[in-house]
Image (cartoon, helix red, strand yellow):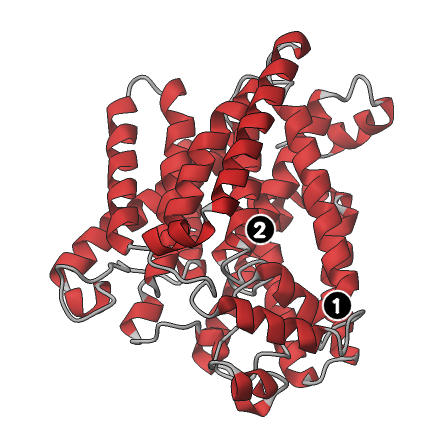
């Protein structure tokens, strides 16, 4: 009876995780409200959603505290992540809209808590499969949703020819998530012989939805990850073989980069873009002008893009009514200044280095998830603002992956780090 009860609790917890990740990705709820933007854009807040998210934060905390020693160890070992969240909270004191910064800072802390809970509760291999299951089910729901309720699932007026957004709030989000899911399933396929056909079917479905979304950013992310994946795998080779391969790859990449620069306008035309990147370059110029007014600490977390009621009014008067800067780094700079950007980038670089070290110590797919996700995040940041966003799937995954994979790397090398042995034993899974 204990075994069945334990399995029931585990199944309920998996369902909770699935629903939370779907909610963080903006699935269904945003589409049914007929809003293409984020519900957080409502300056007064949505009381129902706020209560829902608060309940989720509390449940995630309670679930994580079942392994409280491990939870405390994980949440305190990444000092740069803690420092970044600390800067977010402190920004309330210099924010141009302190009440909004307070509300959104609390939401970001809760979002970070969700990611920390995932890192505490699940191993890297489990996390890899949770991501695959979440977005694969999201892909199936997107097909069903679009075919049965095209008025919601299509970002346009006609099913044929219009871009799909599925159960998500925007076509770009569908494309980016399906690009990630296709690569994650590709990581799982070699080690799963029994269900390999199912994984390849999922890859095909994800790529199909990526194409149906008609998002250029998602396509660029997917192709970039496909090209970089063999290079990341090559980092496992012996140095005498790896170094020549990497040198050749870098040279080839340099040649391709030069060609892309020389044919920049032709390439943009092929992608249906212009040299302003659909108005982004003048927007970025205006944003940089505002950054120069408060370069060190920024305007406070979530306090800049408040439409005509905030500092963004200056940009709206000379450019289009952008909801954000369409660049993740610029938005972090607006919110937290150079201080926040420096802390985030330093943590990002360290996480990548740790991922390479862990990759060379194992043949499993889990360390590749870190490198793949960080690469997607870096590319995605050039076209969207989803880095340090509250209640957002991309920040949840960043926190979960960064906090879980480096922990495993340290555990594997504890013989050479004797000072960590007692800590590793103290946080051993129950």
Seen in the image, is 210 located left or right of residue 122?
A: left
Report x, y in % for residue 142.
Answer: 24, 54
| Quarter of the image where the C terminus is located | top right
Quadrant of the image occupied by residue 9: top left
Quadrant of the image occupied by residue 118: top right
Q: Nearest to the eye among marks 2 and 1: give it.
A: 1
Query: 151 and 400: which one is in front?
Result: 151
Q: Secondary structure at mark 1?
A: helix
User: Residue at horizontal 43%, vertical 28%?
Assistant: 187
Question: Few, some or many C-alpha atoms within 10 Å of disc 1 (few <14, some 14-19, many ≥20)?
Answer: many
Quadrant of the image occupied by residue 381: bottom right
User: Residue at horizontal 31%, vertical 76%?
Assistant: 33
Viewer can see residue 30: yes
User: Residue at horizontal 54%, vertical 85%?
Assistant: 318
Report x, y in % for residue 15.
Answer: 38, 49
Report x, y in % for residue 122.
Answer: 54, 38
Q: Specify which label sits upstream in the sequence, 2 or 1.
A: 2
- CA–CA distance in space, label 2 to label 1: 24 Å
Above or below — where is 79 with respect to 163?
above
Above or below — where is 356 with respect to 290?
above
Q: Secondary structure at mark 2?
A: helix
The residue to which callout 1 is attached is 337
Above or below — where is 390 with respect to 197?
below
Viewer can see residue 9: no
The residue to which callout 2 is attached is 115
């Amino acid at each position: 009876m204990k075994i069945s009860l334990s399995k029931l609790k585990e199944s309920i917890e998996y369902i909770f995780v699935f629903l939370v990740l779907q909610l963080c990705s903006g699935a269904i709820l945003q589409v049914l409200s007929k809003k293409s933007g984020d519900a957080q854009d409502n300056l007064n807040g949505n009381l129902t959603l706020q209560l829902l998210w608060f309940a989720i934060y509390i449940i995630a905390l309670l679930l994580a505290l079942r392994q409280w020693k491990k939870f405390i160890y994980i949440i305190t070992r990444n000092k740069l992540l803690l420092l970044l969240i600390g800067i977010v909270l402190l920004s309330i004191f210099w924010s141009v809209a302190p009440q909004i910064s307070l509300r959104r800072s609390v939401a970001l802390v809760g979002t970070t808590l969700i990611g920390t809970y995932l890192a505490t509760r699940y191993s890297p291999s489990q996390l890899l499969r949770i991501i695959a299951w979440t977005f694969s089910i999201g892909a199936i729901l997107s097909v069903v949703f679009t075919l049965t309720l095209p008025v919601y699932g299509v970002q346009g007026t006609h099913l044929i020819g219009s871009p799909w957004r599925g159960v998500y709030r925007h076509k770009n989000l569908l494309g980016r998530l399906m690009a990630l899911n296709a690569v994650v399933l590709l990581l799982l396929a070699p080690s799963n012989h029994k269900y390999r056909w199912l994984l390849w079917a999922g890859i095909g479905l994800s790529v199909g939805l990526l194409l149906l979304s008609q998002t250029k950013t998602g396509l660029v992310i997917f192709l970039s990850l496909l090209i970089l994946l063999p290079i990341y795998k090559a980092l496992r080779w012996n140095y005498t073989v790896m170094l020549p391969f990497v040198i050749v790859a870098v040279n080839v990449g340099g040649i391709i980069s030069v060609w892309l620069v020389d044919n920049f306008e032709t390439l943009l035309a092929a992608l249906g873009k212009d040299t302003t990147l659909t108005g982004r370059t003048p927007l970025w110029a205006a944003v940089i002008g505002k950054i120069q007014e408060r370069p060190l600490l920024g305007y406070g977390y979530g306090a800049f893009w408040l439409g005509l009621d905030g500092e963004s009014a200056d940009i709206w008067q000379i450019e289009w009514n952008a909801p954000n800067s369409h660049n993740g780094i610029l938005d972090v700079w607006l919110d937290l200044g150079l201080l926040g950007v420096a802390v985030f980038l330093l943590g990002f670089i360290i996480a990548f280095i740790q991922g390479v070290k862990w990759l060379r110590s194992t043949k499993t797919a889990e360390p590749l998830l870190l490198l793949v996700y960080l690469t997607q995040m870096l590319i995605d940041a050039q076209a969207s603002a989803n880095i340090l966003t509250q209640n957002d799937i991309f920040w949840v995954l960043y926190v979960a992956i960064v906090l879980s994979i480096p922990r495993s790397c340290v555990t594997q090398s504890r013989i050479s780090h004797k000072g960590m042995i007692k800590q590793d034993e103290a946080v051993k899974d129950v």
